[in-house]
Amino acid sequence: MEKMDKAERLKRAPAPKARISPELAHRLPPGQTLTDRFPILHEGDVPDYGDGSEWSLRVFGLVDGERTFSLDDLKAMPRATVVCDIHCVTRWSKFDTAWEGVRFRDFLAAAGIRVRPEARHVMIHADQDYETNVPLEDLMRDDVLLAWGYDGKPLTPKHGWPLRLIVPHLYFWKSAKWVRGIEFMKEDRPGYWEQRGFHNYADPFREQRFSDESFEMPEDEWMHKDYD
Ligand SMILES: Nc1nc2c(c(=O)[nH]1)N[C@H]1C(S)=C(S)[C@@H](COP(=O)(O)O)O[C@H]1N2
Ligand SMILES: [Mo]
């Protein structure tokens, strides 16, 4: 048998995938690499909510009456810990992140919020002038959390204190930090990134990064990354 030239063999070999054990590989969406660090990404400055006592959450839109909640109101609701993998569109994924808070659907039930039947979409309103849209059905899933804790500790300001959303099955830009409002809507409407070329739904396993295939990831999205 003829020995194939090494360079030729290398050229023909498939490009190495991210170094990840075969048992974990199915959890890593296409085009993602795994990180143990916790990158910090957001638009605008980190808001300072101190002990959270001045913070409030407004629920409005297609509900029977607008309501406002304090952090203490939320903490008195049934608590849950969700351990999940998170996937950022800038190609990092982090496995087994542990968040503490109240499930979105438990929040609605505990607060007695009556959502009108015509509501199909939700706009999450957050600082700084950030918003992101998620179908209501998706928010009702078992692992969707309104979180005030991470890894057994209160959220740090940079990661969204006092309250952030966690939607593990969508790219992480849907997991808004510093949430201030939840708006129930009949028609869908694009949020901050959804208006700027990113996918409206954002399923990482279907690699729904951009609304238009020809859209390129802006260079600074890759480079300007801070870590804990
Ligand atoms: N309010 C707000 N939430 C936000 C963002 C933002 O700019 N503002 N960025 C999103 C993006 S793109 C990502 S990847 C995650 C990053 O969360 P982390 O900093 O805790 O890793 O927050 C999301 N939530
Ligand atoms: Mo992101």
Image: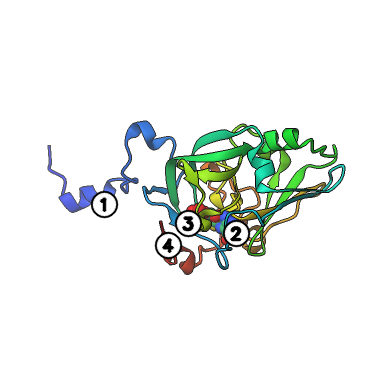
Q: CA distance from mark 4 to mark 3?
A: 13 Å
Label at residue 120: none
Q: Nearer the viewer, mark 2 or mark 1?
A: 2
SS label for mark 1: helix
Which amino acid type corresponds to the residue marked 2 in the rendered image?
Tyr
Vertical comparison of 161 with 135: above or below: below
Q: Nearer the viewer, mark 2 or mark 3?
A: 2
- Residue bearing mark 1: 11
Vertical comparison of 126 with 145: above or below: below
Labels 3 and 1: the sequence-earlier one:
1
Residue 78 place in picture, x, y as percent: 64, 32
Labels 4 and 3: the sequence-earlier one:
3
Q: Is residue 166 left or right of residue 108?
A: left
Q: Nearer the viewer, mark 1 or mark 4?
A: 4
Is the shortest distance between ligand 2 and the CB of mark 3 under 8 Å? yes
Q: CA distance from mark 3 to mark 1?
A: 27 Å
Label at residue 90: 3
Label at residue 49: 2
Which residue occupies the foreground of this view, 42 or 88? 42
Q: Nearer the viewer, mark 4 or mark 3?
A: 4
Disc 1 crowd rating (10 Å Cα; few below 14, some 14-19, many 20+) is few
Q: Is residue 33 left or right of residue 76?
A: left
Q: CA distance from mark 2 to mark 4?
A: 21 Å
